[in-house]
Amino acid sequence: MDVSQTPKSGQDDSQARPDNTIRQYQDTAYNSQNFPPQKPRQEKGFLRRMITSGKPFSLSQTTDSITIYGLDDLTPSEMAEGEKGPKPMYWTETKLTGESLSGWSQVYVLIGGIANVCLMFALPLLYAIFLLGLFIGKSGVVAGWNDGYADIFLGITLYGTLPCLIIHLHSRVLNAGYIFVAPFLRAKRVFELNRINGMVTLFKKNKPFFTHPFIEFDCVLMSSPTQQGFLNYSLTLIHRYRDYSVGVPISGSMGANHKVIEYLRFWNMVQRYMDISQPLPDILVLEPARQRDPTTIAYDKEHSRNPRYWRDMTEEEYAQKLKMLNTEQKSISATGKSIDIFNKSVENLSS
């Protein structure tokens, strides 16, 4: 399926990289308008019934509905900083990746957090106490400095401020992707959803555990009670034809404590992302990628979409827009008509 296209000149911006535009989707890519009918589900064993117990979300035609939860963690200014650096985004025109912290990286994050707290609160307080003692001392500033205060200042700076600054700067540069990440600090890959070839991959110990076409997965909203009596949710893809003991947890970026309809909206976004007959979801993190995806290029050209609609917003405008979207979407369906993948037909989605 050759989909080579170029964006119109009016939609290019400083971040455009035409040489990276996708030229062709693979034959295995998911297309909601053209797919082979799927085999009937197999009988479920006990283990499969256990891991699929939850609220099923069917494959469906998609809408413009999005969830704002998880998206509000990224702002236009942070997006601008990310575009300047070499570190790739977790969600691009080719793939959506999920990662988790390794044991050592969790320790590193903890140390970095302690260093930041020291820089913001503890060390300024120590310096304030030091200066107060120096200036109100009876012997005077010069005599006090020569009478031990110099050693105190040197100790605070050498053993407190300097290590915290080094940790903080290393963390900033590391997060920006400018320096090599030690193997023991690298995040562990959890999953990958690939728009180009339509494949879903689950990783185990940073190596592929299984890879199957997107259309072969059933989406299930898992729930588990907390000690406080609330429910934690997880949106999981379960392979329909293999009895794996694990599924693909795709909703980690959202968090676990939102309304059920928000997970349905996220599922709508994921389907739209994987469906090559549809443009990419219109969200901030994917805005730079829109000019490199052929289906999206054609859609944006037809609708004269501003290529920097999200990125040119201020922080306040962005927050206000997300708030407005959240209110507007309460009166519309989170997703479209259900697709009967076994008979290759579209049905009304049950409420």
Image (tube, helix red, strand yellow):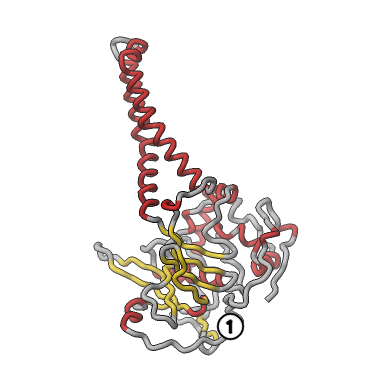
Q: Quadrant of the C terminus?
A: bottom left
**Residue sitting at x 48%, y 64%:** 67
**Residue 133 in sight from this viewpoint:** yes
Relative to 104, is 12 on the left or the right? right
Relative to 270, is 143 on the left or the right? left
Q: Is residue 109 above or below residue 284?
A: above
Of residues 151 and 9, the one nearer the viewer is 151
Relative to 63, is 164 on the left or the right? left
Residue ID for mark 1: 35
**Residue sitting at x 59%, y 47%:** 84
Crowd around label 1: few <14 · some 14–19 · many ≥20 (10 Å): few
Q: Position of residue 121 (x, y in %)?
A: 36, 35
Q: Please, which residue is most extreme toward the right here?
A: 9
Q: Is residue 203 above or below residue 168?
A: below
Give the quarter of the image for residue 112.
top left
**Residue sitting at x 45%, y 59%:** 70
Q: Position of residue 46 (x, y in %)?
A: 31, 83
Disc 1 secondary structure class: loop
Q: Disc 1 marks which amino acid?
A: Phe
Q: Position of residue 114 (x, y in %)?
A: 35, 41
Q: Quadrant of the N terminus?
A: bottom right
Q: Is residue 251 above or below residue 31?
A: above
